[in-house]
Image (cartoon, rainbow, N blue to C red):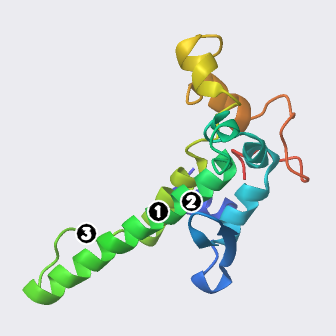
Amino acid sequence: ASQKQLDATLPSKSSKAERQEIFIPVSGFVWLYPEEVKVINHPVFQRLGRIYQLGQTYLLYRGATHKRLEHSIGTLHMVQRMIDAVSHTCDKYKAKNSQSYGAPISAEEERFIRLGALLHDIGHVAFGHTIEDELFLINKHDSDERLNLLLLDEKKQWTDVNGKPLGIL
């Protein structure tokens, strides 16, 4: 299939005017594109809201209660700050030197980077590092097997209300 045919099958991207905000304690208000909100609302992503980012650390440090869901949204927020800094640096250098200091990040690249930040922990399970890295009881959270299970969901166990796995969304 040509790129044009492929692009025609994809939903159109939203504009910055359609963004939504969500509040998380560490980062404050984080803005999201509607497509990212759909990812966050998917059951595979929502399960991260039941997994503590720091395991049982909250039992000793009562404030250490954030979950992997909040961490992933916070990561998206930080990556956007990095994207903005790169864009600012490119613009600043171009204004001083009337030439580009490398190519600025395109809108498509920005969306891809943001999605990567949002999904970077999607394969985690509770106490994952302990049972993956120390006890070797299950495959790592970023193994192809685990990611295929969650993103492709051939058994249709983790689909959204429309029956779509996260990888299709």
Q: Identify the image quadrant of residue 5.
A: bottom right
Q: Decide: few, some or many residues near mark 2? Use Cα within 10 Å; few <14, some 14-19, many ≥20.
A: many
Identify which residue, 75 or 27, lies in the foreground: 27
Identify which residue, 40 or 26, lies in the foreground: 26
Q: Is residue 84 above or below residue 132?
A: below
At mark 1, the secondary structure is helix
Mark 2 or mark 3, earlier in chain: 2
The residue beneath circle 3 is: 103
The kind of residue on which mark 1 rests is Met
Residue at horizontal 20%, vertical 83%? 92
Q: Please give the label number shown on residue 28.
A: none
The residue beneath circle 1 is: 78
Q: Decide: few, some or many residues near mark 3? Use Cα within 10 Å; few <14, some 14-19, many ≥20.
A: few
Q: Are marks 2 and 1 in contact (CB under 8 Å)?
A: yes
Image coordinates of residue 7 in percent, x first then y, are 59, 62
Image coordinates of residue 83 in percent, x first then y, are 39, 68
Residue at horizontal 46%, vertical 67%? 80
